[in-house]
Image (cartoon, rainbow, N blue to C red):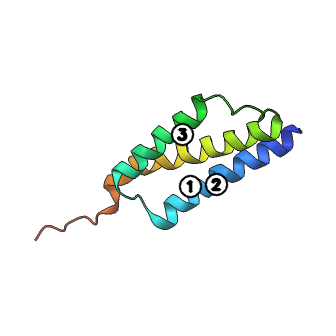
Amino acid sequence: MSFTVVLLVYATTLGLALLMLYLFKAQAWYWHLLSLAAAFGVGLMPPPAGWQGPVVDLLFGTVFIFLLVWGVGGLLTYGSRSPRRKHA
C-alpha cells in the first residue's frame, strides 16, 4: 500500500475527529474516557484469525486514531464549554 494513501487516510481520520469535537463540543467525560479505553483495546488486540493484510491494518489504525483523538480532545476541552460568569 502506498505511503501517500496511508497518510491521506490517517490525516482524514484526524481531521474528522477534530471536526466532530468542534461541531458537537465535548460530551460527558465518561464517553471520552470510554473512547480512550476502546482505542487502547483496538490498538492492543491482535487481529482476528484470517484478517491479515495492509487493508485490515489500515482499518484498525483508522479506528484507533479516531477514538484516541476524540477521547483525548474531549477530555482536554471538557471544562471549557461552560460560559464564563461576569462579575457584577
Q: Crowding at label 1, few (<14), some or many (≥20) Cα neighbours within 10 Å?
A: some
**Residue type highlighted by circle 2:** Gly
**For mark 2, what is the residue?**
15
Name, please, the residue furthest toward the front: 49
Secondary structure beneath disc 3?
Answer: helix
Secondary structure beneath disc 1?
Answer: helix
Residues under numbered marks 1 and 2 in contact, where contact means CB atoms less than 8 Å apart: yes
Q: Position of residue 60 (x, y in %)?
A: 68, 40
Q: Nearer the viewer, mark 1 or mark 3?
A: 3
Question: Does residue 52 lie above or below 9 as drawn?
Answer: above
Question: Does residue 40 lie above or below 83 as drawn?
Answer: above
Name, please, the residue furthest toward the bottom: 88
**Real-space CA distance between mark 1 and mark 2, rounded to the nearest whole angstrom:** 5 Å
**Real-space CA distance between mark 2 and mark 3, rounded to the nearest whole angstrom:** 17 Å
**For mark 1, what is the residue?**
18
Residue at figure coordinates x 85%, y 37% from the top left: 3
**For mark 3, what is the residue?**
39
Q: Crowding at label 2, few (<14), some or many (≥20) Cα neighbours within 10 Å?
A: some
Quadrant into which the N terminus falls? top right
**Residue type highlighted by circle 1:** Leu
Residue at figure coordinates x 71%, y 45% from the top left: 10
Q: Is residue 61 left or right of 25 when viewed as pictured?
A: right
Quadrant into which the C terminus falls? bottom left
Q: Quadrant of residue 39?
A: top right
